[in-house]
Image (tube, rainbow, N blue to C red):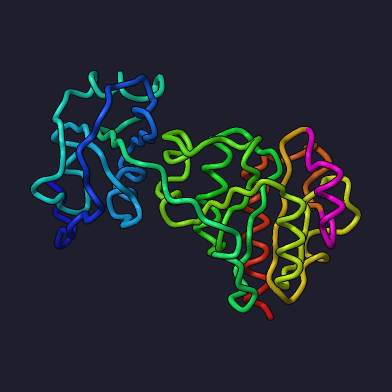
Amino acid sequence: MNTNGPRRALRGRAGRMQGGRGSGRGSKGAVRLWGRHAVEAALMNPERQHRKLWATREGIDSLCGDLPEDFPVEYAQAQDLARLVARDAPHQGLVLECDPLPDLHLDDVLDSESRRPIVVLDQVTDPHNVGAIMRSAAAFDACAIVTQDRHAPPESGVVAKSASGALEVVPWIRVVNLARALEQMADAGYWRIGLAGEAKATLAQALSTGPIALVLGAEGEGMRHNIAEHCDALARLPISAAMESLNVSNAAAIALYAIATHEDSE
């Protein structure tokens, strides 16, 4: 039993699950999440419609809050939960099936007055990277992550686990046309910086005093030419010549830290 202070009510919207089990996949139209941080954040999110929680008793006790009395829970052994998630996924005794988060639009998050950065991902398809970037976005107070509706991973347990709860707090905006979305950001007053290893300017030199849209491309290929053309500046991280590049999630974390400390120093 968790004894770290008073336990809060986990007040997500619970509903009865319909459909059967899958191997890491939710039933039709559902998302399956696992791991304590991902599940607890989803349970606390009022925007989530919950269907069912499979859990060990130890998993339930690890939650920093109390489930409503009528919440649909099925107790199971750890080895049984392993059949509900992706292979070798660390479920930590908790597997939650829920509806996907409601769709959001770019207009919902654009706010140049707040000066919180936006993270734009151009064809970053690895769900582990997207989740890790989302976690950094939450840590450094980014207002949203923007991806194309295609060439990006779906909302999933892998993304949620890598995001460690950030999937529930960082808006994820999916757009049809990424270049058009960047134009919309410019119209709203954002300075668009694309990270590119071949750029002459460093990120510190490219930063402006206004809100930033940070654009990152896929590992290896980088940003597409059309997306780079829609940036106001291209910049690089000044890494050692002994290393060719950084993982895109590491680059995002460093860049977001630079943006945050640049604002603090003004």
Total count of labels: 0
- The answer to if 232 sits in the magenta stretch is yes
Left or right: where 57 falls relative to 205: left
Segment colored magenta: 221-235
In this picture, is 78 found above or below 141? above
Q: Is residue 189 above or below residue 33?
A: below
- Please say if 127 is above or below 39: above
Query: Looking at the picture, how far across and down is residue 118, in whole percent?
Result: 63, 60
Question: Residue 223 vs residue 106: left or right?
Answer: right
Which residue is found at the position 64% from the left and 69% from the top? Answer: 261
- Residue 77, compared with residue 43, is above or below; it is above
Could you tell me which quadrant the C terminus lies in? bottom right
Instruction: Depth check: give the residue in front, 250 or 71.
Output: 71
Residue at (26% x, 24% y) in the render: 81
Residue 146 x, y percent position in the rendering: 62, 52
Query: Seen from this angle, which residue lies furthest left?
Result: 69
Q: Nearer the viewer, residue 253 or 109?
A: 109
Report the residue at 31% width, 57% height from top.
Answer: 46
Q: Is residue 151 magenta?
A: no
- Residue at the image position 30 percent from the left and 18 percent from the top: 83
Work out whether residue 39 or residue 69 is closer to the camera in this orientation and state it. 69
Question: Which corner quadrant of the image does residue 74 belong to?
Answer: top left
Where residue 77 appears, as percent x and y from the top left, is 17, 23
Q: Position of residue 86 (x, y in %)?
A: 40, 23
Horizontal side of residue 199 vs 19, given as left or right: right
Q: Is residue 265 left or right of residue 85?
A: right
Using the rendered view, name the quadrant where residue 80 is placed: top left
Residue lying furthest right in this view? Answer: 200
